[in-house]
Image (cartoon, rainbow, N blue to C red):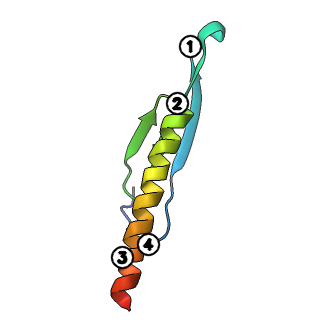
């Protein structure tokens, strides 16, 4: 797998969603894989994944803003 550098202002993940358990107690599971690093994260719920993405987006926005300010 290529370990390319992710460009500023851009986040990319491969989303996988699958169901575990039987019909009566089926649960959806979620994973995200960063195609740039190969890092994979699993989540027990969609809400957990969304919380992770919010943090990633906030952090990416702070880094991008800091880079732009450094260019002025």
Q: Which residue is mark 4?
A: 8
| Nearest-to-viewer mark from 2 and 3 | 3
Can you identify the residue that label 2 sits on? 45
Where residue 11 is drawn, which disc sits there?
Answer: none
Tag 4 secondary structure: loop
Residue 37 locus on image (x, y percent):
36, 55
Within-10-Å neighbours for mark 2: few <14, some 14–19, many 20+? some
Residue 34 horizontal/vertical position (percent): 44, 52
Judge depth for marks 1 and 3 and give the one in front: 3
Residue appearing at x 41%, y 82% in the figure: 68
Residue 34 seen anywhere in this rendered image of the structure:
no
Position of 3 with respect to 14 (left or right) is left
Residue furthest to the bottom in view is: 72
| Position of residue 59 in the picture relative to residue 54 (left or right) | left
The correct choice, above or below, for 15 with respect to 37 in the image is above
Quadrant showing the C terminus: bottom left
Spot the residue most to the left. 70
**Which is nearer the eye, 20 or 27?**
27
How many neighbours does mark 1 have within 10 angstroms: few (below 14), some (14-19), or many (20 or more)?
few
Q: Distance from label 4 to label 2 (Cα)?
A: 28 Å
The CA distance from mark 3 to mark 4 is 11 Å
Specify the label residue 21 is tagged with: 1
Q: Earlier in the sequence, mark 4 or mark 2?
A: 4
Q: Tell me the residue at 36%/79% (across/down).
A: 67
Residue carrying label 3: 66
Q: At 42% from the left edge and 64% from the top edge, which residue is drawn?
A: 60
């Amino acid at each position: 797998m290529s370990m390319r550098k992710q460009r500023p202002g851009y986040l990319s993940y491969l989303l996988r969603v699958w169901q575990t358990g039987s019909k009566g107690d089926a649960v959806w599971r979620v994973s995200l894989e960063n195609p740039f690093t190969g890092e994979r994260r699993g989540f027990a719920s969609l809400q957990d994944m969304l919380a992770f993405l919010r943090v990633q987006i906030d952090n990416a926005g702070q880094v991008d803003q800091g880079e732009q300010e450094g260019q002025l």
